[in-house]
Image (spheres, rainbow, N blue to C red):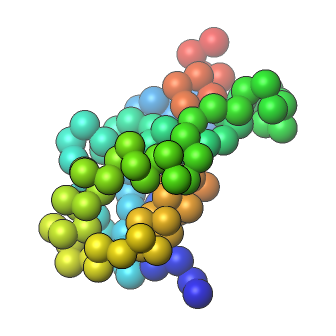
Amino acid sequence: MENPFTAKWSTQGNTLCLGHWDINYQGLPLVLPEERRDQDMGTKGIYNFIDPDDELYLEGLDEDDWLLENIDWLSDVFIEHNIPLEEENMRLFYKAVNKADWRCGSCGGCI
């Protein structure tokens, strides 16, 4: 099954902290809560621009913990955009944002 969610961080390179989320469901844009639009999502990954494979820099929540932590606002977004409130859809959302997630300092722009 193809993921109906696509997620992209609006900036690349050395200005990650100046971007915002562009997330779509089946091609239609989602509006995130204001406090989520321009922040990292806290998903699990290695966010080190010098050595992106170094497990010492692994941080964030795995899928199950992230869903428990974010279920309230994510449910509101799904309801607002008529997305079925199903666990599989929430997991697909996580997978989409996890691919594009970032951390302050992960681009090296502030060094």
Vertical comparison of 70 with 84: above or below: above
Q: Position of residue 40 (x, y in %)?
A: 45, 38
Q: Nearer the viewer, residue 4 or 22?
A: 4
Vertical comparison of 24 with 50: above or below: below
Q: Is residue 10 among what the camera can see? A: no
Q: Is residue 110 found left or right of 85 in the rendered image? A: right
Q: Position of residue 2 (x, y in %)?
A: 57, 83
Q: Is residue 13 among what the camera can see? A: yes
Q: Residue furthest top?
A: 111
Q: Is residue 91 found left or right of 1 in the rendered image? A: left
Vertical comparison of 25 with 74: above or below: below
Q: Residue at x 59, y 22 (%)?
A: 105
Q: Position of residue 37 (x, y in %)?
A: 31, 44
Q: Position of residue 30 (x, y in %)?
A: 28, 64
Q: Residue at x 38, y 57 (%)?
A: 22
Q: Residue furthest bottom?
A: 1
Q: Quadrant of the C terminus?
A: top right
Q: Quadrant of the N terminus?
A: bottom right
Q: Residue at x 41, y 66 (%)?
A: 90
Q: Residue at x 57, y 16 (%)?
A: 110
Number of marks in the rendered image: 0
Vertical comparison of 91 with 33: above or below: below
Q: Is residue 46 found left or right of 83 in the rendered image? A: right
Q: Residue furthest left?
A: 80
